[in-house]
Amino acid sequence: TLSSNNEQKPRILLMGLRRSGKSSIQKVVFHKMSPNETLFLESTNKIVKDDINNSSFVQFQIWDFPGQIDFFDSTFDSDMIFGGCGALVFVIDAQDDYMDALNKLNITVTKAYKVNQNIKFEVFIHKVDGLGDDFKMESQRDIHQRANDDLSDAGYDKIHLSFHLTSIYDHSIFEAFSKVVQKLIPQLPALENLLNILNTNSAIEKSFLFDVVSKIYIATDSTPVDMQSYELCCDMIDVVIDVSWIYGYSVRDEQETTAFDEQSSSLIKLNNGTVLYLREVNKFLALVCILREDNFDHKGVIDYNFLCFREAIQQVFELRNKHQSMTNSSGSP
Ligand code: GDP
């Protein structure tokens, strides 16, 4: 049985046919593997529970299923597997013939829906790096259409599928995961609101709240996200983390520590008059802002506003913890 602690975590299931790219996604997003190294991954043939809780703010598990799992096998406990699941990510290899995958998607989604109607269904149309733009759009349209038709034919009009075009060779996989994770964070509106307030009061153009380890952004302000800004912020995190690990790493009292902590901040000026400003929010989260260099003159105000912002973020999450310990008080401590 699962411990009560595990049940609280929103759980993401990662499913799809064999070789669709599940293990690669998991390794690249959560374990910093470089995309080229995934060529040597061994195929998954058992359920992998990857608990990334200790290093990441986002608390969830990825269950990597083998492609040919048989739902009608009596050893497959669908109540247990789908019951506590927040989102089901179904990976489809867009470079391959996807008829089989669509068939599997339909069986999986309807089975899961019967157990748990609150699951968010997310379809990753994956490996699109190998496709031309026209073909990419055409595949997305076709997959979208067929998947929805199959569902309504089976009488499941109510099931909503979200689609994402993804590849591990660019930032699209991180973007897609950000969207998936954000749907599972109940505090999202509060976080967005705090970011909006911070931006208005500090003349910031765009800000992201990042889970540092995975480079998933768990919230951003309500202005639209453009991929380039997101990529810039991801690159900045990589630079800061790398420098921290190389030059800030030390072993103190037999404990490994890095220079990346609550005190961390970094500032990068770009040649187009824009500034990237990173501040650490807590052990897991960092705020990355994009603003015009002219507006960075009043850095003192920005820093003051940031402290207020950090305080507010802490309160938002403390509320959650309080709520959880209240609902949990009947169980184990
Ligand atoms: P799994 O069986 O679903 O876990 O699939 P794997 O993660 O083992 O991936 C199968 C193959 O697909 C590997 O050779 C990966 O390198 C490759 N792959 C995974 N993601 C991508 C992608 O986004 N683009 C491309 N071109 N290949 C990918």
Image (cartoon, grey):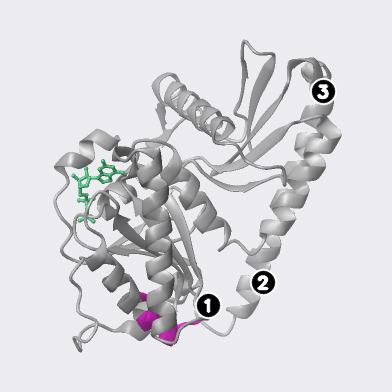
Instruction: Name the kind of residue labelled 2 in the image.
Output: His
- Is residue 65 among the parts visible in the rendering? no
Residue at position x 39%, y 69% from top? Answer: 147
Whether residue 26 sits left or right of residue 316 in the image: it is left
Q: Residue visible at 54% across and 36% down?
A: 227
Q: Nearer the viewer, mark 1 or mark 3?
A: 1
Q: Amino acid at mark 1?
A: Asn
Can the viewer see residue 229 in this picture?
yes
Query: Of callouts 2 and 1, which one flags the residue occurring earlier in the amino acid sequence?
Result: 1
On the image, numbered disc 3 is attached to which residue? Answer: 300
Q: Residue 92, how many percent across, how many down?
A: 31, 58
Q: How many marks?
A: 3
Please indicate whether residue 8 sits to the left or right of residue 265 in the image.
left
- Residue 117 vertical placement versus 269 (above, below): below
Picture coordinates of residue 312, whole percent (x, y): 76, 49
Q: Which residue is mark 1?
A: 118
Name the residue at 47% across, 71% down. Answer: 5
As drawn, is 191 to the left or to the right of 116? right
Q: Earlier in the sequence, mark 1 or mark 3?
A: 1
Q: Which residues are magenta?
A: 109-118
Decide: is 172 above or below 274: below
**Magenta region's main secondary structure?**
helix
Judging depth in this view, the residue of 289 and 157 nearest the camera is 157
Question: To which residue does mark 2 refer?
Answer: 323
Query: Is residue 197 part of the magenta span, yes or no?
Result: no
Residue 261 falls in which quadrant of the image? top right
Q: Nearer the viewer, residue 170 or 160?
A: 160
Check disc 1 and report its element: helix, strand or loop: loop
CA gap between label 2 and label 1 equals: 20 Å
Residue 324: give x, y in percent of width and height. Answer: 61, 72
Determine the secondary structure under disc 2.
helix
Nearest to viewer (mark 2 / mark 1): 1
